[in-house]
Image: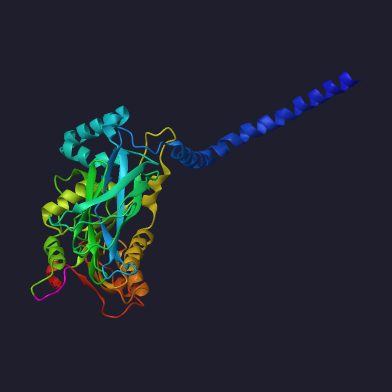
Amino acid sequence: PPLTRGRAASRGREVSVQPSLTMALRLGPALLPLAVIVVPPIANMLAWRVASRHLSNLDHVQLFPTYAKAVHVPGSDTPGWDVWVRGVVYEPEDVHPAKRAVMTALGRAADFAGFSGATLKQRLRPFMFDYSRNKQVNVTVDGCLNRDDCPRMELGPGSYRQNAVSGADGIFDGHLSIPPTPGLVPGDVLRVVGPHTSAGARLIAPEGLTVVSDIDDTIKHTGTGSVSRVLYHSFLTPSFRAVDGMPTLLATWAGGDAAGAAAADVHLLSSSPWSMLPSLLPWLEHEGFPAATPHLRRFRLELFEPWGLDVGSLRLLQKPLQYKLGVLRRLLADFPGRHFVLLGDSSERDPEIYGAAMREFPDQVKCALIRDVPGRAMATGRGERAFEGSPAGRWRVFQSPAELAPR
């Protein structure tokens, strides 16, 4: 009898397995989209956790131009400085056979279509990098870039070094603390040094004028609103093209004038991915734009990882209003004593973004200037709606930089 019961029980279990298996087979296709959504971020998280923090021989580090704000140090009449540090850790695309093949094919296709394959590959390179996550980067300060007689900084232990750790997109952020140093003044540019790389960090006074400018279709022709024009102006045109008069206007604002107006500090704020910076920075200098701190979106595109498309690329889907307003809030909070001029265009959401910033910080945001882009001009009433509730008379629309006063 015990044996009989056991066999009966076994048969019962065998019979009970069949409906479960059938249900699993039916639910499998329905659960597949969920798995596609859930598995990549989990794989990214696990890969980030197990990645070695030490830089490998293949890792490259690039520092971005940044700024430093003055901080009060108790017992000292000379301010200290808080230096914002930002950069990226990556492996070049040429160490991966699949990426080399893709770059070669795209270059040949561009040549065949009558464009420059070399230009396309050069501008696409940063998008093809393999970004190194969880890497520890030691950053320090070594003198000034703008003068040879930079005062010696008596740096205490740990005050001038920052061990920043890169995120899943390879980007790392950190802060360096510079103690009070007589002779170190606003306008000086500190030399921030990392592994085989360096960049400048401009010292910004607590008071003065700050200009925050958009890039695409404000100072550089991009063709926002048309995918084909954006791709052409970003990757295929032999050279980026500046909006007439913009280099002179920003350089004038940044240089002060004979009447005693102080030099403005310039920031460039764009919804474009940071991967455009290696192409943008040399062009900005060549065109005569003043030195500026760039603020571009964090971005990572990893089509060649085992788990597929990296979720970090979804940052580009973030609304420009959320991203740009977040950066503006940080700048306005870092410099509560400075006045801000916001420069943008009508092709995107700049009027609405600047209107929100002006309503939130009416004492700091003194003016918003909107370039009326041909073909994407300001609709009737848009400006009034965008700046509704902000101080009257603090915004205007212009077609040419020549319409704006030099200061």
- Residue at the limit of the structure toward the left, as seen here: 258
- Residue at the limit of the structure toward the bottom, as seen here: 392
Dominant secondary structure (helix, strand or loop) of the stretch shown in magenta: loop
Res. 251 image quadrant? bottom left
Left or right position of 214 against 306: left
Looking at the rendering, in which quadrant would you find the C terminus?
bottom left
Q: Foreground residue, 111 or 154?
A: 154
**Is residue 228 at all visible to an observer of this figure?**
no
Look at the picture and state if 258 lies above or below 118. Answer: below
Left or right position of 132 against 281: right
**Residue 17 in the image, given as x and y percentages of width and height:** 72, 28
- Asked if the stretch drawn in magenta spans residue 406, the answer is no
Magenta span of residues: 259-263
**Is residue 191 at all visible to an observer of this figure?**
yes
Q: Foreground residue, 14 or 202?
A: 202
Count how many numbered circles sit on residues in the image.
0
- Asked if the stretch drawn in magenta spans residue 261, the answer is yes
Q: Foreground residue, 290 or 99?
A: 290
Left or right position of 361 against 339: right
Look at the picture and state if 310 lies above or below 270. Answer: above
Residue drawn at (16%, 65%) of the image: 254
**Residue 135 in the image, given as x and y percentages of width and height:** 37, 41
Looking at the rendering, in which quadrant would you find the N terminus?
top right
**Residue 69 in the image, given as x and y percentages of width and height:** 28, 63
**Residue 121 in the image, given as x and y percentages of width and height:** 21, 37
Residue drawn at (50%, 40%) of the image: 42
Res. 269 image quadrant? bottom left
Look at the picture and state if 356 lies above or below 291. Answer: below
Q: How is the image coloured?
A: rainbow
Residue drawn at (11%, 57%) of the image: 288
Residue drawn at (56%, 35%) of the image: 29
